[in-house]
Image (spheres, grey):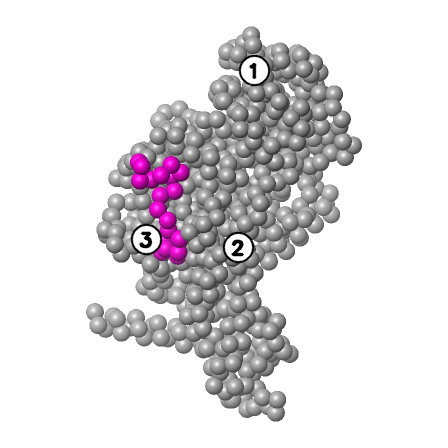
Amino acid sequence: MRGVRWRRVASQIGRSIAVWAVSTLTMLVLAALLPDFRLQSADGDSVTRIAVTAACGAGAFGVLSAVVWPLLVRLLLLVPALVLGLLVFFLNGSLLLLALRVNPSGRGEAAPETAVVVAAVMSAVASATGAALAVRDDETYRRRLHRLAARRRRSDPPCPTTPGLLLVQLDGVGHDVLKAAVRKGVMPTVAGWLEPGDGIRPTGDDVPRPTHRLTPWRTDWSSQTGASQLGILHGSTFDVPAFRWYEKDRGEVMVCNRPTSAAELQRRAMRHTGDGGLLTVDGASRGNLFSGGAGEQALVLSIAARRRGRENRSRAGYFAYFSDPANAVRTALSFVAEVVREIGQSTRARLRGQRPRVSRGGLYPLVRAFATVVERDVVLAAVMGDMLAGRTAVYADLVAYDEVAHHSGPCGRDAEQVLRRLDRALALLQRVAEHAPRPYRIVVLSDHGQSPGETFRSRYGLTLGDLVRAGCGLHVPRRAEGTHSGAEARAAVRAALRRPVEEKGEQQRPVRRSEPIVLASGNLGLVSFPDVPHRMTKEEIDARHPALLTTLANHPGIGFLLVRSAEHDGVVLGAHGAEIPLAGLDDQPGPLARFGPGAADAVRRTHSFPHTADIMVNSAYDPADGEVLAFEEQIGSHGGLGGAQSHPFLLSPLELSAPVDGVKELTGAEQVHQVLRRWLGELDGPQVPLTADTGTDGTGTDDTDTDDSGTDGTEDERAA
């Protein structure tokens, strides 16, 4: 045993010397290339003297980075996350200047702006060298992974030997998109998990045995993250009619990716079910809209509205990740690379005249880089810490694909590149699971898909709001205003920056109560009349605006309408005077026929919600090509009925029971929640009902700056 310990010590010393040597060489090269950075006196020095100066400077910089940097980041925890990311360069440069000042030779010198560059390069090179050396040593790699859980919960009992459950949500990845990516070789990790045949992966004697099964499921009418993730984590999608909707009794617009709305939806779901959520027992929620009742949270939107300084757990993941300067520099460089990649891809699409196409300028390149780089890296680091801490249940959302597909299309090359990186992230988590203190069952799922198609505005030259105003006889602006994307990443960016969460068109109260409020959720539109306290009937709408329903129902870009009816409770309206009571949709689906099985049930369920809009509008859908017309400026959209957006997937290990039996199909996120609860029970991880100790918001205990998301992040670059 003593010999093994000494070999470990010798190996660690050897790696440290190797990293020091590479850092010294890097400093020498940079001194030769950069005019404002020198390692010799003005009169010149010998090669040996310069090398000694570089070695001392590299050593001092390494020590300062290891000792001072975590303290600096801890002091800057109150700084917004993205600002902290930018400060990384300047703080790292300051450490280099300090290292040169304390250098015994006294010969190092650098301009401040040059010090920033030198420090960034040296941090990245040192991190890459250390990681490369660790990969060659399995024992070292195991110990490095265990250091990702920086401060284990020492007062807790030993980690159970029963398997834990890791749930990774690939936001917006539809069932068919996943299958196509596997067939093309875009996602080799997922391909290795699946059964051969069915055109998904090749057959043969040399093909590894499958470990997972792929199961499709169908969303409710509201095919978007707010409804689906609320149902998956909290077991209820009741009264979530869309991504955004107006509530007459409160006089406010609810938006699923607004922190205050997310917190309210979570409270309602918990009251409705009487339960804390899927993650109540020893769970962790990472990068989600809702907590799931988890006691350990980071980057959770439903708690982002709280301003409690260091106690705001929604930002704990940023501190844990950026506490390592190598992580910060690596992510910052990847962020810049992603911005450049997006600018190049959008320019190429514009030069080629690609159609359909939406604007990708302004701040969008930064939003995309945040979703595909910053949030991914921080969430992955937090999840790795959870696994190595032995958490019973972990749920994490990776929003990268959804954000890119909204603007580049769900099946294009840009989206495929994101899927490749997500597959590498899954491979990384699989490898971490091999070193966790307990076995893990990895479940990958999505909350919805995305349907392609041009926007309603680009095809017809006006927005849904313009069409509604025209039908009401109101003034229509000559220049239509575009609607904002409902992508989850935008809210995450605003929360990270601590900026107001409102967007144009999402004001909490209407300016004029006599005018209709028109909101868009992908290809689902909602029209509400705020001056009428109740949900209006078809007869009341016709009496007030005789041309409105006819104008909407007969427009070629509209698939169908849902309105309340005094005579039939509720009716579906379509072109050419089609009017079908909800009770008769099974025998006579009318305009719902092209939307496929389950459409009638989804419409009827939404009709029962207390806050369903006066007029629910679903865009036209072409079954031949699966295209819909988004009421937002998105060429890949979701939120309503029509095409791939309603068909996400569930990828589960074969050790767990089958999600469904026979030909029965999973319908709705609430059923997915029940499946996940059953699996937790099979893994001996039963959940408990909501108790007074949990609190009314299900946030549990505070974990700010604790070990579960604390990481040194040394391995997460493998997913980049």
**Spot occupied by residue 635 in the image (x, y as percentages of width and height):** 63, 37
- The quadrant in which residue 529 appears is top right
The three-letter amino acid code for the residue at tag 3 is Ala
Q: Which residues are magenta?
A: 691-710
How packed is label 2: few (under 14 Cα within 10 Å), some, or many (20 or more)? Answer: some
Residue drawn at (47%, 75%), measured in percent from left and top?
Answer: 61
Tell me if label 1 and label 2 are in contact, CB under 8 Å.
Answer: no
Left or right, 416 with respect to 425, comes to: right
Q: Residue at x 35, y 59 (%)?
A: 150
Say if 580 sits above or below 361 in the image: above
Q: Nearer the viewer, residue 289 or 668?
A: 289
Q: Is residue 698 magenta?
A: yes
**Distance between mark 1 and mark 2 Cα atoms:** 46 Å
Residue 564's tag is 1
Identify residue for label 3: 389
Does dot 2 land on a helix, a strand or a loop?
loop
Q: Amino acid at mark 2?
A: Pro
Q: Can you say whether 205 is above or below 564 in the image?
A: below
Instruction: Between label 3 and label 2, give the one nearer the viewer.
Output: 2
Q: Give the labeled residue for mark 2.
A: 80
Residue with the most extreme top position: 567
Q: Earlier in the sequence, mark 3 or mark 2?
A: 2
| Residue 212 x/y as whole percent | 38, 40
Q: Is residue 324 above or below residue 189?
A: below
- How far apart are labels 1 and 3 at the CA level? 52 Å
The quarter in which the N terminus is drawn is: bottom left
Magenta stretch, main secondary structure, is loop
| Other-residue count near label 3 (Cα within 10 Å), few / some / many at <14 / 14–19 / ≥20 | many
Q: Nearer the viewer, residue 163 or 287?
A: 287
Q: Nearer the viewer, mark 1 or mark 3?
A: 1
Residue occupying the point 45% across, 26% down: 238
